[in-house]
């Protein structure tokens, strides 16, 4: 009974505003660029060889462990309006909340390739 109450409380808390997954983005580049198509924004784990400029810093947290694809799509959706071609994930990890509950998080930068370089060539 106690475990059922704890599970119900965690589910309820997960539905409150501000307790679910979030993506924060801070524009760091000057000016405005045309928006990108979210489906075309790459998710990279290493810095590309292509020349690029940083468009924004980006962080996300509170994603269920099994929702990595949804987390990546959320990063794409936030970076695309700023004209990003890719999001480079610089750090990521998991947070333990007790009772066997883990969430994942990631930090990185949204980048735009400089003219003439349109695809990544990671190191």
Image: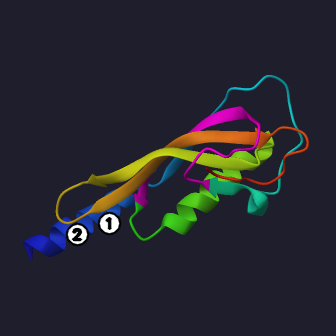
x, y percentage for residue 53? 75, 32
Q: Determine whether, in the image, residue 32 is placed left or right of residue 72.
A: right
Q: Which mark is residue 50?
A: none
Q: Determine whether, in the image, residue 35 is placed left or right of residue 1.
A: right
Is label 1 in a helix, a strand or a loop? helix
| Of 40 and 45, the residue lying toward us | 45
| Of 38 and 20, the residue lying toward us | 38
Q: Which mark is residue 7?
A: 2
Q: CA distance from mark 1 to mark 2?
A: 6 Å
Q: Residue furthest front?
A: 123
Q: What span is in magenta?
A: 44-63
**Magenta span main SS:** strand
Q: Please determine whether, in this image, residue 99 is positioned above or below residue 34.
A: below
* 15 magenta-colored: no
Mark 2 surroundings within 10 Å by alpha-carbon count, few (fewer than 14), some (14 through 19), many (20 or more): some
Q: Residue at x 66, y 34 (%)?
A: 56
């Amino acid at each position: 009974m106690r475990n059922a109450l704890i599970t119900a409380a965690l589910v309820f808390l997960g539905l409150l505003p501000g307790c679910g997954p979030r993506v924060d983005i801070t524009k760091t580049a000057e000016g405005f660029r045309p928006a990108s198509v979210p489906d075309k924004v790459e998710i990279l784990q290493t810095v590309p060889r292509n020349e690029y400029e940083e468009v924004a810093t980006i962080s996300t947290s509170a994603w269920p462990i099994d929702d990595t694809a949804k987390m990546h799509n959320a990063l794409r959706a936030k970076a695309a309006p700023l004209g990003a071609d890719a999001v480079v994930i610089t750090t990521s990890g998991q947070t333990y909340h007790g009772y066997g509950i883990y969430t994942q998080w990631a930090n990185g930068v949204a980048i735009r390739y400089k003219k003439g370089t349109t695809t990544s060539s990671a190191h």
